[in-house]
C-alpha cells in the first residue's frame, strides 16, 4: 500500500478469512486483522465473515459492537488514543484538549496503556507517546504525515514474529570491547530510546570505538528512561534519563569507559533495596536472546519440572504459597490441582495478559523485558496440569509486547523449548498468542475465555470454574502473567525458599507499580509487608508536583481510595483487606491535594457503565444510575436524599452483581464519599 491506493475491502476480507481458515474461535482475530488492513471493519463485510464462519450475522455484529477498539467507519488520517484512566488523570491528562489536534485526527479514549509511571500517555497511530503533551502529540502526528502518510492500515499493522529489527541495534566491529544497554521497553521508546540507541551507535562509529548496543528490557526505574547502561569491570554503570542530544557530551565525558553518570546500576537505592525474583532478569538481558536467558538461569525451572510427576509440580507450587497476582489472590496450586484432577482429552493453560488496571504495568514490563520466563512458566503449568496447548490473551493496547512475545514464541519453538517434544522429553506444549480489542471486563477470567473463543466478552456463571470447564469447555489453568512468570524460580530454587519471603498468608514477592502523581514512578519488586508510606516516600520520592499526598488508590479501578493518614498500612493481602482496601495486581496510584474526589467517584461509576459486560442488572443499570446520583449530589440537589440512594445502590451492586466489576465498583465510590466528604459538599 505504499503507493497510497486504498486496499479493496472484499479482497482483504477474503485474504484474512483464508489466513484463519479452520482456526477455532477466530472471529475476533479476523475482525482485528480486517481493521488493521483497512482501518475499520466495513459493515458490508459482516455477512461474508458470518457465512465463512458459519455464524449468524447477529453474532458477528454483536462482537463488532462489543469491543471499544473495533470501528465500523473509516477513521481520520491519524488515530490518537488518549489515556483517560486514573493514573493519567493524576498526571494531568484532563488538560489535554483533544480538539486541538486537528480535524483529520480521530481521537479515541483509552483506559490505560501500561505507561502510567510517565503519563499522561497516548498512542499516535500505534506509537506510544508518554508523557503526552499537546506539542509532542502534534509533533508526532506531523512527523508521521511527512513520511507520505500511508493508510491507517499500514500504520497499525503488527506482524507476529517480527523481530523488531527495525529497532536500532548496532553490532559494530567484531570483538567489541564495550557493551552499551539501551532499553527497548515501550515506555523507554516513548521517551526516545530508539534515537538514543542510534546516536550511541553513530557516536561510536565516528570515534572508531568498538561498541555493541544491546536492547534490553527496562530496569523498572521509569522516571530515568531512557536509562543507558555501560558494562564495566565494576559492573554496569547507569546514565539517565538520556536524550539523543546528550550522547556526544556523555561520550566526551567517558561514557564508553563507565565514567560519570549515576554510578553502578545495582547500587542505585531504588534497585538495591528490591528483592528481584520474578523480575530478576528484566532489564539485564536482551529479551529475545536465548543464550543470555540460559546464561542467567533460564530454563532451570522447566528442567526441574520435567524430572517430576505432574502432582509433584503442583505440590511444590502449593507449598510455595503462591497466590494469583491478577487480583483475586487465589492459591495457584489449588487451582492447578483442580485442573490436574479433571479428566479430559484436551486441557489448556491460558495466560491472562489483559492488564487493564490503571496504574499497572508489571505484566507489560515482564513480557517486553523477559518473555521467555513467561513461556517457561506456561510450559511448567502445562506439565503440571496435563495441558499441551497454551494461549496468551494480550490486551491490544500493548503493541510492543505483542511483537516481542510473537518473536519469543517463534524463537523458543525453533530452539525446542516449545512444541511437540519439549527439551527432548517427549512431552508437548505449544503457545498461541491472541489479542483483545479494548475491553476492561475481558480481564475477568470467564469473559476472557468467551473473548478467546471469539465471542462478546460476557462473564460466565460459575460454577463450573474454568479449572474444570474453561476454554472451549475444557479444563483450563488460567493465570496472570506474573503468577506464571513466578513459577520457574519456585521450581528452580524450591518452594521453601520462596515461602520464606513475605508475611502471613502473603508469601513471596509482589511487583508493586508506582504511578500517577509520583516523582519516581516505576516497578518495585519486594517481599510482601513493606508499608505503603515506605513505597511512596522512599521509592517514589513523594509526589511529582511536590504537593502533599491527598489520596492513593491501590489495586486498580476497583480498589478503595486511601487517605494520607492510612499510608502506614502494610502491603499484604490481609492487612489491606482489614482497612477495606485491596492489593489487586499491585498498582499504586498517587494523587496530590489538587484532586477532586467527587470527580474520581463519578469516574469510577462511569468506568463501570462503559466497561460493564451488561449481563447483570445491578452493574449494567446500577452504574448508569450511579453516575446520575453522584451528579445530583455534587450539584447539591437534596444531598439528604441522594446520599442514602447512592449507598443503597452501592449495596445492591456489591451484593447482587455477578462479578467483581459491578461488585467492587462501590469500593472507590464509597471510600471517596466517606473519606473526602468536603469534595461532595457534604461537610456540614
Ligand atoms: C473486571 C475484572 C478485570 C480483571 N482484569 C484482570 C486482568 O487484566 N489481568 C488479570 O490477570 N486478572 C484480571 N482479573 C482477575 C481474573 O478474573 C482472574 O482472577 C485472574 O486472571 C486469575 O489469575 P491468577 O490466579 O494468576 O491471578 C480481573 C477480574 C475482574 C473482575
Ligand atoms: S457485574 Fe457487570 S461486568 Fe460483571 S457480569 Fe455483571 S454486568 Fe457483567
Ligand atoms: S497509561 Fe494511563 S493509566 Fe496507565
Image (spheres, rainbow, N blue to C red):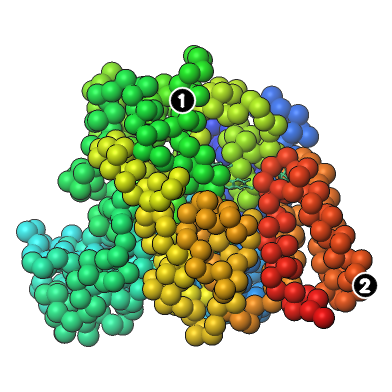
Q: Which residue is mark 2?
A: 638
Query: Helix or strand or loop: what does disc 1 sit on?
Result: helix
In this rendering, would 550 be left or right of 291? right
Residue 121 appears in view: no
Q: Quadrant of residue 671?
A: bottom right
Of the numbered discs in the image, which one, if any, rests on residue 337? 1
**200 or 349: which is nearer to us?**
349
* Residue plotted at (40% across, 51% down): 503
- Would residue 478 appear left or right of 379 to someone viewing this image? right
Residue 318 at least partly seen: yes
Q: Residue at x 6, y 59 (%)?
A: 175
Residue depicted at x 20% and y 48%: 296
Crowding near the residue tagged with mark 1, few <14, some 14–19, many ≥20 C-alpha atoms within 10 Å: many
Q: Count residues near mark 2 (Cα–Cα under 10 Å), then give few for <14, some for 14-19, many for 20+.
A: few
For the C terminus, the quadrant is bottom right
Looking at the image, residue 101 lies above or below residue 510: below
Determine whether label 1 and label 2 are within 8 Å by CB.
no
How far from the left and from the top, in percent, is residue 78? 60, 65
| In the image, the residue with mark 2 has its CB under 8 Å from the nearest atom of ligand 2 | no
Give the image quarter of residue 529. bottom left
Instruction: Pinpoint residue 418: horizontal percent, then vertical percent.
Output: 33, 31
Q: Is residue 447 above or below residue 273?
A: above
Respond yes or no on whether mark 1 lies under 8 Å from ligand 1: no
Does residue 194 appear left or right of residue 654 in this picture? Answer: left
Query: Please, what secondary structure does the residue beneath circle 2 have?
Result: loop
- Residue 576, given in percent of the width and then of the height, sits at 55, 57
Amino acid at each position: 500500500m505504499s503507493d497510497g491506493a486504498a486496499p479493496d475491502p472484499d479482497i482483504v476480507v477474503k485474504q484474512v478469512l483464508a489466513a484463519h481458515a479452520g482456526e477455532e474461535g477466530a472471529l475476533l482475530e479476523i475482525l482485528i486483522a480486517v481493521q488493521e488492513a483497512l482501518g475499520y471493519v466495513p459493515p458490508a463485510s459482516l455477512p461474508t465473515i458470518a457465512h465463512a464462519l458459519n455464524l449468524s450475522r447477529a453474532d458477528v455484529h454483536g462482537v463488532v459492537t462489543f469491543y471499544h477498539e473495533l470501528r465500523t467507519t473509516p477513521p481520520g488520517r491519524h488515530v490518537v488514543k488518549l489515556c483517560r484512566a486514573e493514573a493519567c488523570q493524576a498526571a494531568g491528562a484532563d488538560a489535554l484538549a483533544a480538539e486541538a489536534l486537528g480535524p483529520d485526527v480521530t481521537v479515541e479514549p483509552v483506559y490505560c496503556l501500561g505507561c502510567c509511571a510517565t503519563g499522561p500517555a497516548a498512542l499516535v497511530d500505534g506509537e506510544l507517546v508518554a508523557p503526552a503533551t499537546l506539542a509532542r502529540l502534534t509533533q508526532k502526528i506531523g512527523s508521521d504525515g511527512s513520511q507520505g502518510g500511508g493508510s491507517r492500515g499500514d500504520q497499525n499493522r503488527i506482524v507476529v514474529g517480527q523481530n523488531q529489527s527495525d529497532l536500532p541495534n548496532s553490532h559494530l566491529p567484531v570483538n567489541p570491547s564495550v557493551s552499551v544497554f539501551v532499553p527497548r521497553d515501550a515506555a523507554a521508546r516513548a521517551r526516545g530510546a530508539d534515537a538514543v540507541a542510534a546516536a550511541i551507535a553513530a557516536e561510536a562509529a565516528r570515534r572508531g570505538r568498538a561498541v555493541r548496543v544491546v536492547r534490553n528490557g527496562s530496569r523498572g526505574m521509569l522516571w530515568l528512561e531512557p536509562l543507558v547502561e555501560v558494562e564495566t569491570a565494576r559492573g554496569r554503570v547507569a546514565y539517565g534519563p538520556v536524550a539523543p542530544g546528550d550522547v556526544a557530551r556523555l561520550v566526551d565525558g567517558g561514557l564508553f569507559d563507565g565514567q560519570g553518570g549515576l554510578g553502578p546500576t545495582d547500587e542505585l537505592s531504588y534497585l538495591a533495596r528490591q528483592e528481584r525474583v520474578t523480575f530478576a532478569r528484566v532489564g539485564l538481558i536482551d529479551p529475545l536472546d536465548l543464550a543470555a536467558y540460559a546464561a542467567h538461569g533460564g530454563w532451570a525451572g522447566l528442567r526441574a519440572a520435567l524430572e517430576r510427576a505432574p502432582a509433584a509440580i503442583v505440590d511444590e507450587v502449593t507449598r510455595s504459597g503462591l497466590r494469583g497476582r491478577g487480583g483475586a489472590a487465589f492459591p495457584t496450586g489449588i487451582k492447578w490441582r483442580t485442573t490436574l484432577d479433571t479428566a479430559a482429552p484436551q486441557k489448556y493453560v491460558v495466560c491472562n495478559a489483559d492488564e487493564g488496571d490503571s496504574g499497572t504495568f508489571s505484566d507489560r514490563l515482564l513480557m517486553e523485558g523477559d518473555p521467555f520466563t513467561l513461556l517457561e512458566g506456561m510450559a511448567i503449568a502445562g506439565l503440571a496440569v496435563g495441558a499441551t496447548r497454551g494461549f496468551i490473551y494480550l490486551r491490544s493496547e500493548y503493541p510492543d509486547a505483542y511483537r516481542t512475545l510473537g518473536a519469543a514464541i517463534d524463537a523458543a519453538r525453533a530452539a525446542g523449548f516449545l512444541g511437540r517434544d519439549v527439551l527432548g522429553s517427549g512431552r508437548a506444549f505449544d503457545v498461541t498468542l491472541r489479542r483483545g480489542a479494548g475491553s476492561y471486563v475481558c480481564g475477568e477470567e470467564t469473559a476472557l475465555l468467551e473473548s478467546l473463543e471469539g465471542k462478546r466478552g460476557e462473564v460466565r456463571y460459575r460454577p463450573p470454574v474454568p479449572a474444570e470447564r474453561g476454554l472451549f469447555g475444557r479444563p483450563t489453568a488460567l493465570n496472570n502473567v506474573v503468577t506464571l512468570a513466578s513459577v520457574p524460580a519456585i521450581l528452580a530454587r524450591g518452594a521453601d525458599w520462596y515461602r520464606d519471603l513475605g508475611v502471613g498468608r502473603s508469601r513471596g514477592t509482589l511487583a508493586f507499580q508506582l504511578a500517577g502523581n509520583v516523582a519516581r514512578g516505576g516497578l518495585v519488586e519486594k517481599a510482601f509487608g513493606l508499608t505503603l508510606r515506605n513505597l511512596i516516600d522512599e521509592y517514589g520520592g513523594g509526589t511529582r508536583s511536590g504537593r502533599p499526598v491527598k489520596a492513593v488508590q491501590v489495586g486498580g479501578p476497583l480498589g478503595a481510595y486511601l487517605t494520607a493518614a492510612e499510608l502506614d498500612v502494610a502491603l499484604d493481602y490481609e492487612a489491606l483487606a482489614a482497612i477495606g482496601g485491596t492489593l489487586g495486581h499491585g498498582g499504586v496510584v498517587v494523587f496530590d491535594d489538587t484532586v477532586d474526589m467527587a470527580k474520581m467517584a463519578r469516574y469510577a461509576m462511569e468506568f463501570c457503565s462503559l466497561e460493564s459486560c451488561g449481563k447483570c442488572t445491578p452493574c449494567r443499570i446500577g452504574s448508569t444510575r450511579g453516575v446520575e446520583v453522584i451528579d445530583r449530589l455534587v450539584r447539591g440537589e437534596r444531598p439528604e436524599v441522594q446520599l442514602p440512594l447512592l449507598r443503597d445502590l452501592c449495596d445492591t451492586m456489591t451484593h447482587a452483581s455477578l462479578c467483581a466489576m459491578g461488585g467492587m465498583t462501590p469500593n472507590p465510590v464509597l471510600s471517596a464519599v466517606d473519606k473526602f466528604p468536603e469534595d461532595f459538599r457534604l461537610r456540614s
